[in-house]
Image (cartoon, rainbow, N blue to C red):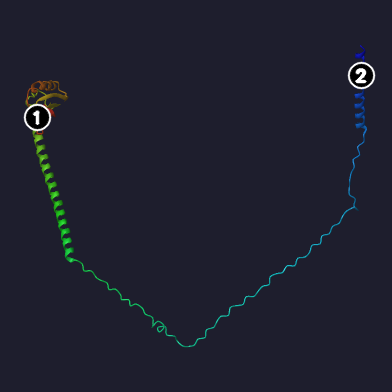
Amino acid sequence: MDNSNKFFYLSGFISFSLFFLIFIFFSLMMFRSVDIKSYALTKNNYISISLDVPKIATTKPKKIKKSSPVSSVVEDTGDNIDVNNLFSDVWTKKITPKKKVIKKEDTKRLLDIQKKIQKKEKNSVNSISEVVNNLNEIDTHNESEESSTAEQVNEYLAKIQAIVYRYFRVPANTQGNSVKSVIELNALGKVIDFRILSYSNNPALNEEVDNIKARIMDVIFPIHPQNIPTKTVVILTSKE
């Protein structure tokens, strides 16, 4: 118990001493006056300095007058100098002008060339004329063949018309009426088909043309000049 009381009093004394010291320190800091010293210069206290700048002498270059060149005057002696005599003793090579050599044209060779050209031209003209003649002959031959073929075809069509009319029996009181038909034949002239393209206004005539097909189916017609199958239009007209 004695030790505890002793430490208690000792700690209280130490704390009180610290508090008192801190209090005194803050009091001194608060009530201490701070003197701010100001420094200024008075008007009388100054230093005057004067600078003495030395003058530098500059020399300007003097202008030098150029002397005009003295033209040398050559006195005219009045004597004429012969220039030809100056080169009289100098040796020079004699230059002879070249003569133009005129080449003689080989007329014989030129004539031969002209003859060859003329011969070629004649041959070309002859060949062209031959070609034209051949073309004309071919055209005339073709025209003659076409005319003969056209005549044969017309004759062939007339025969077809005549054979069909042979099996056409005109009914009474049907004059002026017509029926359009077509007959199809093979290359050998055999009938393949016979049909009516357009009928007339007469029933009796229409009935008659319908019966023609059965009559001509077994008939052998002429062969076409070019040996080709044909389709021929036949117009059956009722006449008196």
Q: Which residue is mark 1?
A: 160
> Which of the labelled discs sits on residue 100, or is there none?
none
Compared to residue 161, the image places residue 42 above or below, namely below
Q: Which residue is mark 2?
A: 10
Secondary element under disc 1, as helix, strand or loop, is: helix
Compared to residue 67, the image places residue 237 above or below, namely above
Residue type at numbered disc 2: Leu
When asked about the image quadrant of residue 170, the answer is top left
When asked about the image quadrant of residue 27, the answer is top right
- Horizontal side of residue 52 vs 22, given as left or right: left
Relative depth, front residue between 36 and 127: 36
Secondary element under disc 2, as helix, strand or loop, is: helix
Judge the density around disc 2: few (<14), some (14-19), many (≥20) Cα neighbours within 10 Å: few
Residue type at numbered disc 1: Ile
Residue 19 picture location, percent across and down: 91, 24
Residue 16 picture location, percent across and down: 92, 22
Compared to residue 140, the image places residue 33 above or below, namely above
Compared to residue 191, the image places residue 112 above or below, namely below
Relative depth, front residue between 203 and 106: 106
